[in-house]
């Protein structure tokens, strides 16, 4: 079995889904793909099913009944991948904001000793393309804010392009991950950090989507800002640090 699998959550990504799947399956080393689709009304799931006949054994899909948040999509994906025995489990967006060619670099970082490799927009400055300055500033200072509150030495705390070793995901209690939106990425890094796992940032260039609509909303950003306080407070209690 190929030990590497990329989880791609989708909701209304018909403009991007076929291209991103074809790109990932063409890579060397080889990666499997798990699409977690939230019953996209635009037919994203139907496109994936059609491609499964072309890529049997490499392309898989979890179909969920409704849109229920990025965090729960990834956690459902993590559980599926752990059950299937994958050693390296990746998160990646469907819209090409994350360059699939960088998957190999994240994998190499974990293979060389990292438990969590983070595709970082801010490791070597600000490496973002096609974002308005207001969004760049919001993202950059959100990460600085998270570092200040949590104490983590991670430049890109909100990054959603990552590779986990299975042992990390098996160790932490996924049922205790509270956030569903933007803050999910912060909480996963914070939990890994609290448990002493090795986290390495790999510099990437992030390019904003050119097809489809962004899923970022004010509510998601609010969750990230205010949720960090509650997450930090909960971390002082013994129950927060319990493993599975």
Image: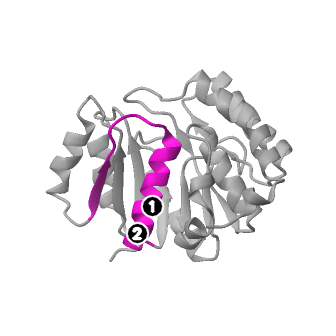
Residue density around tag 1, few if under 14, some if 14–19, many if 20 or more, within 10 Å: some
Alpha-carbon distance for marks 1 and 2? 6 Å
Query: In the visual, does 72 lie left or right of 150?
Result: left
| Residue 83, numbered circle | 2
Q: Is 38 above or below relative to 110?
A: above
| Residue 170, numbered circle | none
Q: Position of residue 203 (x, y in %)?
A: 63, 54
Report the span colored magenta: 58-86
Q: Position of residue 10 (x, y in %)?
A: 37, 40
Whether residue 133 is visible: yes
Circles 1 and 2, Cβ within 8 Å, touching? The answer is: yes
Query: In the visual, does 208 lie left or right of 192?
Result: left
Q: Is 162 above or below relative to 39?
A: below
Judging by the rendered image, the residue that carries numbered circle 1 is 79
Rendering quarter of residue 121: top right
Q: Nearer the viewer, residue 62 or 125?
A: 62
Q: Position of residue 167 (x, y in %)?
A: 57, 73
Q: Nearer the viewer, residue 217 or 98?
A: 217
In what quadrant of the picture does the N terminus appear?
Answer: bottom left
């Amino acid at each position: 079995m190929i030990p590497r699998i990329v989880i791609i959550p989708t909701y209304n990504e018909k403009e991007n889904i076929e291209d991103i799947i074809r790109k990932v399956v063409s890579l060397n080393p080889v990666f499997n793909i798990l699409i977690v689709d939230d019953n996209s009304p635009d037919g994203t799931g139907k496109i994936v099913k059609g491609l499964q006949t072309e890529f049997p054994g490499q392309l898989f899909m979890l179909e969920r009944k409704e849109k229920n948040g990025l965090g729960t999509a990834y956690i459902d994906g993590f559980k599926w991948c752990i059950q299937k025995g994958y050693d390296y489990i990746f998160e990646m967006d469907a819209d090409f904001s994350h360059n699939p060619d960088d998957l190999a670099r994240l994998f190499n970082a974990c293979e060389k000793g990292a438990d969590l490799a983070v595709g970082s927009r801010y490791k070597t400055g600000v490496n973002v393309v096609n974002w308005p300055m207001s969004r760049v500033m919001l993202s950059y200072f959100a990460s600085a804010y998270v570092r200040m509150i949590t104490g983590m030495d991670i430049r890109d705390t909100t990054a959603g392009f990552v590779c986990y070793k299975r042992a990390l995901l098996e160790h932490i209690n996924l049922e205790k991950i509270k956030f569903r939106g933007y803050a999910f990425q912060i909480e996963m890094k914070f939990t890994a950090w609290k448990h002493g796992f090795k986290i390495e940032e790999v510099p990437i260039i992030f390019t904003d989507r050119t097809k489809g609509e962004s899923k970022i909303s004010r509510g998601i950003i609010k969750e990230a800002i205010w949720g960090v306080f509650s997450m930090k407070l909960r971390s002082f209690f013994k129950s927060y640090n319990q493993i599975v």
